[in-house]
Structure formats: C-alpha cells, structure tokens
Image (cartoon, rainbow, N blue to C red):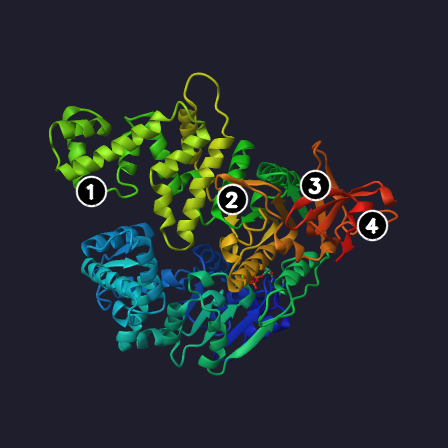
C-alpha cells in the first residue's frame, strides 16, 4: 500500500497529526472529529512510512470492543496481522505484562484473577477473620475503599488515616489484611493488575528499560477518562524517550465517579515536554442538526476547555421527540421505529438504543422479545440473567418447588446468614445418603443432630423464611409477592449496603422485578401465577443472546456507548430523576458529568436521533411522574419535532414554533403560569380568545388551560 493512501482520507489537521515528528501530542477535540481515526492512521503511518515494527507500538483503548475494532482497521489497511501489536485496555495490557513477568512481580505463574464478585467474597472473609462486625463495616464499602486506594496508587502502608478517623483506620486494616491474603495466594483483582504493573516498572529498572527500548510509540484513546494509576503507568513507561500521543475530549469525561481524573488532560502538556496540542474541529459523524443539539447541551456546562465543532454535512432531519403516556407506550413506539427503519432496508445493528441505567432495559427487552426482534445488550447482562434477579427468582422457585436443589444452593446463604460451606456439605451428604432433596435434608439434619446447634438454628431460619413467603402465596397478588420476596429474603437490604453505583443498580433491578410481576398476565386456572411467572423468567433468561454474528439491535447504557456510532440512535427514558439521575441532582459536579453523558449520547448519532420519554413510568417497582429531562429543554426547540399519541391512539406530528392563530403564542414556547410555574406549550384547540392550550409544566406536568383565563406570560 502506498503511504499516500494512509494520508489521503484525512483532513489537513488530521494529516499533520498523523505524520507529525513531535515527540508527544495531545489531540483535544470534540466527538466524531476523527480522534480514533487519527490513532489508527498514525499506527499505519508509522509501520508503512517510518518502517517501525508492529511490535514497537503500544495502543491503549477504553474497551475490549474498541481494541478489536482498532486491530481490524489496521489489518484491513495494511493487510498484515496485528497480533504482534500491543493493543488493548489498560487492564488487558497490565495483565499481559504480569503474565510475562510473574516472577519479577512476585506472583506465581498461574496467578488467579479475582473478578469483582470473587473479590467481595474474599473481603468478607477478611472482615470476619478480623472479628469485625459486617454491618458496621460493610464488605462492599471495604471493597470500594481498597479499589479506590489502588486506583490512586496507594498500598495499605501508604494510606494515612487522619487522626481519630476510625473509618479510614479500620478500612486500612482490612486493606492490609486483604493484601496479605492476596499475596499469599497470588490473587490479583482488577485494580491490582494496574497497580502491580506499575510497581513492576517502578521496582525493576532493567525491565522498564527493556520496554522503553522496545516501544517507539504509545497511543492512548479516551484519555479524559484515565485515572491516577493509569496515568502513572503511562508516565513511567514513556520515561524520557517514548513518545506518547493521547487523544481525548474533556466534554466526554464520564467516569469521574470511578476515579477518572480529567485534570490529567491539563497536566499532560506540562509533564510531557514538547507536547504539540492539536485541535480537530470538523465533525464527520453527525448531521448539522444533531451536532447543533449536542453543542447547545454541552454549552450549558461551565469551565469547559471549550471548542468549536462544525460539520459540512447535511442539515439532516429534525430530532424526533416522542412523549409516551407510560414506559410501555414508549417501548411500543421504539419498537415501531425500529421496525420501520429495518423495513427501509437498514441493518438492525445500525440502531443504538441508549439509556441511563441498566434497569431501563427490561421493558425494552420485553417489547423486542414480543416482536421477535433480535437484540443484543452490549456491555451488560440481560435483565433476567443478572445476578440479583437470579437470586430473587431462586427464592420464588424454591417457594413453588422445594425440590429445586439448584435454587436452594444458590440462596441458602445469599445474603449471608451464617450458613457455611461445611453445613451445606453436611446437607448434601444427607440428601445423597437418604436420596432426598436438600430441603428435606434440613429436617434430617435436625432429627439426626448432624450439625452444631448454631448451624441448625441458621438453617431452620432459612426454612422458616421460605415457608413464610409461601404462606402468603395464596393471599397476595403476584407483584406483592415479588415485593415481599425481595424484602424478606434480605436481598434489598444487602444490596443497599453496597457502596457505589453497583449496589444502587442492583437495588433498582430488584425493584424492577416487582414491576415485571405487576405487568405479568398469568393464564387463569391450573398452575399458580407465581409458578407461571418463574417459568416465563427462566425461559427469557435461557433465550440465548443474539450471537455476535446475527444482525441485532444494540441496547446499552450511555456509559458503554463511548466511542461508538450508529446511523440511528434512540435515547430512551429522557426524564428528570432518571437522566439526569436523581443521585446527581444535588451535586453540581455530578450534574455536569450527567450532561457530558448526554453529550456522549447525542453525538453517537450519525443520521437520525430519536429522543423518548414517558409521562408516567413504573420503574423500580413504583410509579413516578417525571418531567421531561432538562437536557431536552437545552436543545433549541427548532431542532425538535414532537410526536405524540393522542388518547385515541393516533399519532400526529407537531411542528414546534407553529403559532396559535390570533394569539401571541407559539407551540414549543416557554410560558409562565402564576400557580403552575414554567412550562412549554405543547398543543392547542380553537383560536383567539377561545383557544385552549396544553402546557407541559416542569413540575406539575401537562395541563389544558383556556388562554383567556390562564394569564400565561411568555418567558
Ligand atoms: P469520539 O469522540 O466519539 O470517540 P472520534 O473523535 O474518535 O469520536 P472517530 O470515531 O475517529 O471520531 O470518527 C468519527 C467518524 O468520522 C467515523 O465514522 C470516521 O470514519 C469519520 N471520519 C473521521 N475523519 C474523517 C475524514 N477526514 N474524512 C471522512 N470521514 C472521517
Ligand atoms: Mg473515538
């Protein structure tokens, strides 16, 4: 391949960046401006024009999917295999290093990686071993603490507790003990991968020297979301001679809650001498309309580095805004849009459906399953396969069928109720010996006094719990039963104690199960509704995810959508409290991060963008009336075209800014009412003095008012 083919599909600024001779470069640019493209072409350029070996290139991406895409692009361009290249996530690359140098890192050859669940179990054991009270020192919080310290590059010995701070002191003690258990067993958690890889370079100058010799170029994508330890690792590896190209966008920094440091962008130019700062301003991804909407939203944030993003592309269609009566209506509309798009001959994979929290996928999944549209949940699990949902369902399964040994094993000690492995082993033995179920083995164990009193009491407690839920089966509706189950089982309380978003998400998912139970319509007669519900859930979970090769609609959270693009994007659930998430409303910093997330969402769209919200929503088991997200209001109204469903089920389009005849009012206009506050004019009937208008108030929701009495003021 001719090198000009590497440079010709680039604009001038991109081309200069790709062929730059500068030691270090920081490409700071908005969404869709070709940052990732610059990295890919830079790699190709180095290999073809500079004759640099593929082995001398190290590229860091944010997700494994992004790493795969980067490899494929390079292979396509250069027609060479990319396996010699170090392309991966920070975690993936750190793992690779530790695999090669386990000895130097003080590990055994087959060191074991702890995933987050494994880690939690271990932390729990440590806490118990230290004789600490789990309710006072929740394992989840300790896990969060340990990982945050590691992300900051701190070992237990490096953590200094402020005088008299019992919390930090105790957490540090747990961290210390955990460290020892891990190092004895050669166990490596995710945060440890990064820290250990950093220390490997720190403590082994000869190794560091070897890699500094080896690599001729380091490239980092999504640099705005690197955390402290990742940045330290980059700095030590690059040393004074390996050039680094980092690309990023301060407006797309969305992992602050997980320790990412946007300040790394600011310090980069200072710490990597001779850094050339490159700005790309032309967006190649989206239509003008989409880009203008994105720019308007992000412009509300303060303290941005600021940039000017433009496109020479088509104006494109208006952004569709759909208001559903409720979440079912919203899901139905989304399915229709998807079907219409596919009928036009587009691929399913050209559609990205993005939402703020995992639990929101459930209603959409049900709608897609109902219409047999293949879909794929990307970067997350399908609702019925999530751990907490499977746990809750296992309780229900055991209630309907005591012989369900798999459900029994799953939950006998989840959440922890002091029933250890030894006890369960005894039950298994008894069940084998007497050829009974594990459930019956409980009775056998007490008849034969096969266990210590404490264990007997614990398993009797579990038995009573299941019987208690069962006793309510005949009297309660399915949804109440689901609600009782998640509470009585202790699952809700257990996940509420978890720190961070993960615990919050699990609680939300459990509550969502109650909604699912409410919507479930069992057949009359025969099998009990609970049994039917449990069976239906099992079938859905067993329905294997559309595989990688099947063309399928892509569902994912906004966080997982980073770096991706789709011809059609549907942003679902755009309501206050959902997005921006209610947890972020009190903190200005968090709210700005939510807005960046919205910017990320809008800028995933290439041709069409549909925004949907529901006027009432059942989520997490309860009904809420949320106003449309403030982010919708931040989009200039002339870019939006609102579609609504009337009560009779007819859809009609309303064109914002159409004026109401013989009045001073326009549709889409913001107005103020003395009692209801501010809102947007959505609809009208009649004209002049007799006109009635529908106003969607920010707080009170939508109302019909007679214009001549309403005394509305234009805001
Ligand atoms: P994000 O911030 O979302 O990660 P990005 O800055 O990394 O975006 P890319 O994904 O590299 O942007 O590019 C966005 C789209 O624009 C891609 O489809 C890419 O192929 C296309 N593109 C980039 N530069 C050019 C160009 N010079 N000519 C034509 N298309 C381009
Ligand atoms: Mg990118």
Query: Which of the two discs, 3 and 2, labels the residue nearer the N terminus?
Result: 2
Looking at the rendered structure, the secondary structure element under dot 1 is: loop
Residue position marked by numbered label 4 in the rendering: 659
Quadrant of the snapshot with the C terminus: bottom right
Q: Distance between the residues labelled 1 and 4?
A: 71 Å
**Label ID, residue 644:** 3
> Of 67 and 321, which appears nearest the observer?
321
Q: How crowded is mark 4: few (under 14 residues within 10 Å), some or many (20 or more)?
A: some
Q: How crowded is mark 3: few (under 14 residues within 10 Å), some or many (20 or more)?
A: some
Query: Which of the two discs, 2 and 4, labels the residue nearer the N terminus?
Result: 2
Residue position marked by numbered label 1 in the rendering: 420
Q: In this view, does 400 lie above or below 200?
A: above
State the residue at coordinates (43%, 53%): 501
State the residue at coordinates (28%, 77%): 205
Looking at the rendered structure, the secondary structure element under dot 3 is: strand
Residue position marked by numbered label 2 in the rendering: 360
Report the mark closest to the observer, 2 or 4.
4
Q: How crowded is mark 1: few (under 14 residues within 10 Å), some or many (20 or more)?
A: few
Q: Where is residue 580 in the image (x, y as percent from the top left)?
A: 55, 54
Q: How crowded is mark 2: few (under 14 residues within 10 Å), some or many (20 or more)?
A: many
């Amino acid at each position: 391949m001719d090198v000009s083919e590497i440079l010709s599909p680039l604009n001038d600024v991109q081309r200069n960046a790709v062929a730059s001779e500068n030691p270090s470069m920081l490409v700071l640019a908005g969404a869709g401006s070709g940052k990732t493209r610059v990295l890919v072409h830079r790699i190709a350029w180095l290999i073809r024009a500079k004759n640099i070996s593929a082995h001398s290139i190290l590229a860091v991406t944010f997700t494994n999917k992004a790493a795969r895409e980067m490899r494929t692009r390079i292979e396509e361009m250069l027609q060479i295999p990319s396996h010699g290249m170090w392309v991966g996530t920070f975690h993936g690359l750190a793992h690779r290093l530790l695999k090669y140098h386990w000895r130097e890192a003080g590990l055994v050859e087959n060191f074991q990686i702890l995933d987050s669940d494994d880690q939690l179990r271990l932390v729990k054991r440590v806490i118990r071993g230290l004789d600490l009270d789990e309710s006072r020192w929740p394992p989840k919080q300790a896990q969060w603490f340990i990982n945050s310290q590691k992300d900051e590059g701190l070992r237990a010995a490096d953590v200094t507790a402020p005088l008299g701070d019992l919390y930090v002191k105790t957490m540090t003690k747990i961290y210390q003990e955990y460290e020892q258990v891990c190092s004895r067993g050669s166990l490596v958690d995710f945060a440890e991968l990064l820290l250990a890889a950093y220390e490997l370079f720190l403590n082994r100058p000869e190794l560091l020297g070897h890699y500094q010799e080896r690599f001729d170029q380091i490239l980092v994508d999504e640099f705005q979301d690197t955390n402290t330890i990742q940045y330290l690792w980059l700095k030590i590896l690059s040393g004074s001679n390996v050039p680094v190209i980092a690309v990023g966008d301060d407006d797309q920094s969305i992992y602050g809650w997980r320790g990412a440091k946007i300040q790394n962008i600011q310090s980069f130019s200072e710490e990597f001498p001779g850094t050339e700062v490159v700005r790309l301003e032309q967006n190649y991804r989206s239509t003008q309309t989409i880009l203008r909407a994105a720019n308007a939203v992000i412009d509300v944030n303060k303290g941005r580095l600021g940039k000017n993003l433009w496109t020479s592309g088509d104006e494109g269609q208006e952004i569709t805004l759909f208001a559903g009566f409720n979440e079912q209506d919203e899901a139905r509309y989304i399915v229709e849009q998807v079907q219409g798009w596919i009928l036009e001959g587009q691929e399913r994979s050209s559609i990205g459906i993005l939402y703020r929290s995992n639990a929101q996928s459930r209603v959409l999944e049900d709608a897609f399953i109902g219409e047999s549209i293949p879909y794929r949940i990307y970067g997350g699990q399908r609702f019925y396969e999530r751990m907490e949902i499977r746990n809750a369902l296992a309780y229900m399964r055991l209630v309907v069928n005591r012989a369900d040994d798999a459900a029994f094993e799953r939950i006998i000690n989840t959440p922890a109720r002091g029933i250890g492995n030894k006890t369960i082993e005894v039950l298994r033995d008894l069940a084998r010996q007497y050829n009974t179920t594990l459930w019956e083995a409980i009775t056998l164990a007490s008849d034969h006094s096969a266990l210590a009193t404490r264990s007997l009491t614990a398993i009797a407690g579990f038995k009573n719990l299941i019987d208690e839920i069962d006793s309510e089966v005949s009297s309660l509706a399915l949804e109440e039963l689901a609600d009782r189950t998640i509470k009585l089982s202790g699952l809700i309380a257990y996940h509420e104690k978890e720190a961070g978003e993960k615990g919050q998400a699990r609680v939300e998912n459990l509550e969502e199960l109650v909604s699912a139970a409410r919507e479930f319509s069992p057949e009359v007669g025969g099998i009990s509704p609970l049994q039917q519900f449990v069976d239906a859930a099992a079938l859905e979970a067993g329905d294997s995810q559309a595989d990688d090769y099947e063309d399928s609609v892509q569902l994912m959270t906004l966080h997982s959508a980073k770096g991706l693009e789709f011809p059609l994007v549907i942003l679902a659930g755009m309501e206050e409290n959902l997005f921006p998430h209610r947890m972020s409303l009190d903190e200005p910093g968090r709210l700005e991060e939510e807005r960046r997330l919205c910017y990320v969402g809008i800028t995933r769209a290439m041709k069409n963008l549909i925004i949907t919200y529901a006027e009432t929503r059942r989520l997490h088991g309860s009904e809420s009336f949320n106003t449309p997200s403030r982010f919708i209001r931040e989009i200039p109204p002339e870019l939006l075209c609102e579609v609504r469903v009337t009560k009779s089920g007819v859809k009609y389009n309303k064109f914002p800014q159409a004026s109401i005849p013989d009045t001073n009012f326009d549709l889409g206009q913001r107005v103020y009412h003395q009692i209801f506050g501010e809102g947007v004019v959505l609809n009208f009937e009649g004209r002049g003095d007799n006109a009635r208008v529908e106003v969607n108030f920010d707080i009170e929701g939508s109302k019909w008012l007679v214009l001549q009495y309403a005394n509305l003021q234009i805001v």
